[in-house]
Amino acid sequence: MSSTVTTSPAPAMVKPEAEWDTLIERVRATVPEAFGREGRPLNLVQGIWCEPGHPKPFLSPVDGRLLAHQPMLELEAARRAVRAAAAESHLWRQVNLDGRRERVRECLADLESHRELLAYLLVWEIGKPYRQSLVEVDRMIGGVRWYVDEIEGMLEGRHPVGLVSNIASWNYPLGQLFHSLLVQLLAGNSVIAKTPTDGGLVALTLASAIARRSGLPISLVSGSGGRLADALVRDEAVGAVAFVGGKAGGRDVESALIDRGKSYMIEMEGINAYGIWGFSDWALLGRQLRAGFEYGKQRCTAYCRFVVERTLFPDFLDTYTEVVRGLTIGHPLLVQHPDDDPPDLDFGPLINSSKVEELRERYQEAVTAGAVMLHRGSLDPARFLPDQDTSAYFRPIALLGVPRNCDLHHLEPFGPLDTIVVVDRLEELVAEMNASNGALVASIACDDPALAARLAGDLRAFKVGINRTRSRGDRDEPFGGLGGSWRGAFVGGADAVRAVTAGPPGDRSPGNYPDQVILPDDHPRILG
């Protein structure tokens, strides 16, 4: 079944203040030290913006335009950056907690004064619609302020590990990566981060320059993750590593750290599944399905598999298709008049055209092997500029009955490509929901609370919702994964501080380790 996306009247322009050329000039005027003579971003090493590296073109997913050049470093330059950042940790740990709080508060106030600029940068760099980008900026600022107020008790009897190295995905450069950096700094560590290769370069450059002006020991480098791993992961100067990425990269990071006695937090992919059994509140599920398409499901907690009791499949399909037919997809900054706000889309482009091609190959493999295409959306030309490059935009697709020998049965698509499985027995439902051997989140839709709770206990997910979806969470809520979706210390709330500090001998932070899983004492794993 295919459909056409419902749209509003055709937008016609990008507001002058939202154009990339205007935004990048504002950034260069705000933090001129972060750019070289040709206006290209630099790396932040030893507290100085330097090292232009090897320039790699960075294109916008919105319309394919050149945004900037990533200053890609080679290994030796990255090693110098890591050792200089580690040396800063010795001075930083001498600053007391009140002093660290004061500098982080100053940084947050400056970031807040640039919240709209940061949000517009995210739109162009990672394709996230403007309102969703604003939410990311605000959650980052609000979340760190919570730590500023609450961290004193979290640090009791603990001390910083030194330098924390961060390698993260591109989808939340501020809300996840920069938030983590500020919490790690607040805990008394120096930090170094690798700019995600696919997005966030200019937003992170601006935020890091603001942090550096506030006296925070932060370093920022660009480069290939595989090429720089010897410095960012294996160097003896690194005290802890935080990694967000795929399973292959995560396994490599863990193998490099497992015998070195360092703390590590490794978030990897997994299939987040929603099971539907003995359920009747389709209006509730419809609202959850619609919210789940935010940012094109390019989120680690997006639900990409729906496992449905056979007798409920007609009702589920009616609900699902009504939702996807109403999705709004398009250029995230087009407006009809200069005074209009950017459109409130469900999603814009995916991160790049390569991701679109990857999803096409996966669904074509599944259909060739026997899967049934239940829905394939379409893109409305009215939501794009004439002759605009739309190679990074993807029509939402749903497939029924993907064979087990296809990639989509085992791998997270990380995009609006859903798989639906029909089952007849509860054992099948649990097995299909656990197909990827671990996930960050899962949910059960069921009218029987006792049955739902029993099913939830069998799921290999860190958080399980009953008639509700789960997310990473904010502030005091712990976050992690079970099985192959996570390795190392959990984060969130006090756990984010425990993961980058050392306690008494024998202390081990809650986490998912190769030998055992240690859940936080107050972990609300299942919520109804």
Image: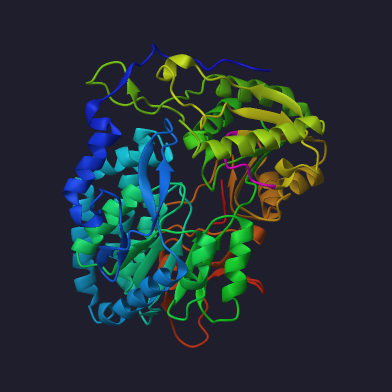
Is 490 part of what is drawn in magenta? no
Judge left or right: residue 215 versus residue 409: left
Quarter holding the N terminus?
A: top right
Quarter holding the C terminus?
A: top right
- Could you tell me residue 303's position as x and y percent? 59, 41
Closer to us: 344 or 443: 344
Q: Residue at x 51, y 72 (%)?
A: 230
Closer to us: 390 or 184: 390
Q: Residue at x 65, y 17 (%)?
A: 2
Judge left or right: residue 320 versus residue 290: right
Is 415 part of what is drawn in magenta? yes
Q: Residue at x 59, y 55 (%)?
A: 246
Q: Is residue 308 visible?
A: no
- Could you tell me residue 137's position as x and y percent? 32, 46
Q: Give the extent of the magenta segment.
A: 411-416
- Indicate how the structure is coloured in the image: rainbow
User: Taking 333 as reference, is 266 above or below it?
Assistant: below
Closer to us: 283 or 403: 403
User: Taking 331 as reference, is 357 above or below it?
Assistant: below
- Could you tell me residue 457's position as x and y percent? 68, 54
Q: Name the main secondary structure of what is drawn in magenta.
A: loop
User: Taking 67 as reference, is 95 above or below it?
Assistant: below
